[in-house]
Image (cartoon, rainbow, N blue to C red):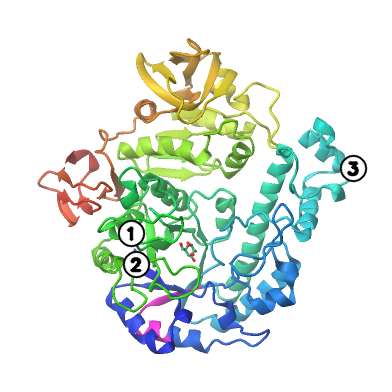
Amino acid sequence: MSIGVCYFPEHWPGERWERDVEQMAEAGFEHVRMGEFAWDRLEPERGRFEFGWLDEILDLLAEHDLTAVLCTPTATPPKWLVDERPGILQETADGTVRGFGGRRHYCFNSPAYREETERVVSELADRYAGDPRVAGWQIDNEFGCHDTVRCYCDDCAAAFRDWLRERHDDVDALNEAWGTAFWSQSYPSFGSVDPPCVATADHHPSRLLAYYRFASDSVLDYNRLQVALLRDADDDWFFTHNFMGNFGDLDARAVAEDLDFASWDTYPTGGFARGGDASLRTGAFDTVGMNHDLYRGMSDERFWVTELQSGEKDYPADSPQPAEGAMRLWAHQAVAHGAGAALYFRWRRCRSGQEQYLAGLRKHHGGPDRAYGDARETAADLADLDPGPVDAPVALLHDYEDAWALDIQPRSSSFDYWAHARTYYSALRRRGLDVDVVGTDADLDGYGAVVAPTLCLADAALADRLRRYAERGGSLLVTMRSGVKDEYDKLRNDPAPGPLAGTVGATLDQRESFPRDEDGLDLTYRGESFAYRTWAEWLDVDGADVVGEYAAGVGEGRAAITRNRVGDGTVLYSGVWPGAELADALVADVLDAGGVECADRLPRDVRCSTRGDAVWVLNFALDPVTVRADGDAEWLVGDEEVPPAGCSVVRAPLSELAFER
Ligand code: GLA
């Protein structure tokens, strides 16, 4: 567990480097990430490589016992390259070429860009293979940032057609699989299938889903190309990529299989927090937590936070200052969720370019910025901690393809795959539970309870595994919009939840959806009244018990929530998007059925995470919280008075902690 920083030496004159590096070492850092946008410095003109400046910095880091994580510079093809080979540029769906001037302007399927990538990556691999100053590599930077996973250029069109040819015996099979009889959309040949560019109406969902899969596979392939070159040069290096939070365009789980571990860039107030509560200052903690758990699930032992917000943020437009201490709290949250390292973004604010209004640990003129003290303190906190792994008793299933299918036909102005899953995640976290966010193919043995939101594309194999999990005594929660579509995004012949119907013991009769703020969406669950939002399914039971019924509306009296016994286990099905109170009640029942012990609800804006025998108490509120622990408890960081935006770590079982505000 260590703290590090992202550094851009190319922004500063060489005379400042030594002082910068000394200060990083003084702060107790271990890792320094560099080079992700430095192609023009590494290769100012074709074939003329300049590694001298990088070597100088690497020497300085090594002298101060700091290890470097280098990045391949492919997110920013330089001007000379774009001018020579303009065909590498991305195209949007309306045919606009995305020109030079930002970043990520290349196409993943451009043969020319793949050639250039091989060239620059091989050069770096040769130069630094076996170099003890370099611990590992970050491949590229934030695949898909600025909406760049899906390109619509001619190279993509050709690659898409090949991708389809590999997946369908002939074009008739494709027409059949997609159901192109609708609106006269049959294709006479593979060569006639274009990327889904701008059209008058919505595109055919099967074509869109195929394109989303293809685009994600293209990134996977591109990442694999780079990893293979570097690994071949030195397989002692580690390889990671800095994914983003709540980012659905790319199947990160699939990409991460080629890496040693996944990383992600964490900006708790920038981008996620909506305001109106403490999250404006301390961040959207469950969104952040769920992403930590998602990326931990893609990494065998550790995940990293490759960028951590260090204060003022440049995007989105509004940028409130984080609460005092929040930048330490966020690093602790990452570690509490199992991160092996958290690297602050960035060492110094810079004086030029697009990101002048983004904080650093040091101000652009060199003095300490707001997060510098937080970063030092966190490094000191962590120096003596050696906690065990996260051992979550509950799994939450997550699937990128389900997210794509639901995104293509959301059927509601307020449906959002991530927010819906987070409703359950937050309910689990409010009970102090650690949660593994895992793919639908994960091994479920060992989890007391499994929460499976919106398994839209669930197939027979997944249904079978879930049934077996329940039969062996598991407690399973399946939700609305599951088992609806086949793998090509067509409605199944059978009523939803399709292959899951036997396990759920109920089928879908009707569905309805609502705007976000619709009032009066009430149901009774086990005799109590609760609110729901956005989505409602009227269920026909076939073996299950009805435990929730609509209390109002056209569906009044219809079944909304069912409970089924399957072998030794229990399967709860929720046909609604629950409000927070209903989510808590559902989760409490699922945990109870699975014999999972949990705490009473934690105080507002407090979260706890357990690693081995250490519990992190993370206070995201703007007022303090007091923790009562018995005399055997050992305070490893802080004490029972946890300040606003503060954190304490205690060696004691969570069940023996009591909270007061
Ligand atoms: C992303 C990028 C960084 C930087 C930050 C700024 O996370 O990876 O290079 O642009 O955003 O918010």
Amino acid type shown at disc 2: Ile
Q: Is residue 621 left or right of residue 499?
A: left
Q: Residues within 10 Å of mark 2 (few under 14, many from 20)?
A: many
Mark 3 → mark 2, Cα distance in angstroms:
57 Å
Residue 566 spot, x, y in % from top left: 49, 21
Q: Secondary structure at mark 3?
A: loop
Q: Secondary structure at mark 1?
A: helix
Q: Earlier in the sequence, mark 3 or mark 1?
A: 3
Q: Which residue is mark 2?
A: 3
Amino acid type shown at disc 1: Ala
The correct choice, above or below, for 146 with respect to 370 in the image is: above
Q: Quadrant of the C terminus?
A: top left
Q: Is residue 62 magenta?
A: yes
Picture quarter containing residue 344?
bottom left
The correct choice, above or below, for 641 with respect to 487 in the image is: below
Farthest right residue? 188
Q: Earlier in the sequence, mark 2 or mark 1?
A: 2
Q: Are marks 2 and 1 in contact (CB under 8 Å)?
A: yes
Residue 233 spot, x, y in % from top left: 59, 76
Q: Which residue is mark 3?
A: 188
Q: Closest to the observer: 265 or 360?
A: 360
In the image, the residue with mark 3 has its CB under 8 Å from the nearest atom of ligand 1 = no
Q: Is residue 335 magenta?
A: no
Q: Is residue 520 left or right of residue 620?
A: right
Give the residues drawn in magenta, as a range: 59-70
Amino acid type shown at disc 3: Pro
Residue 259 spot, x, y in % from top left: 54, 61
Q: Quadrant of the N terminus?
A: bottom left
Residue 415 spot, x, y in % from top left: 53, 34
In the image, the residue with mark 1 has its CB under 8 Å from the nearest atom of ligand 1 = no
The correct choice, above or below, for 176 with respect to 277 in the image is: above
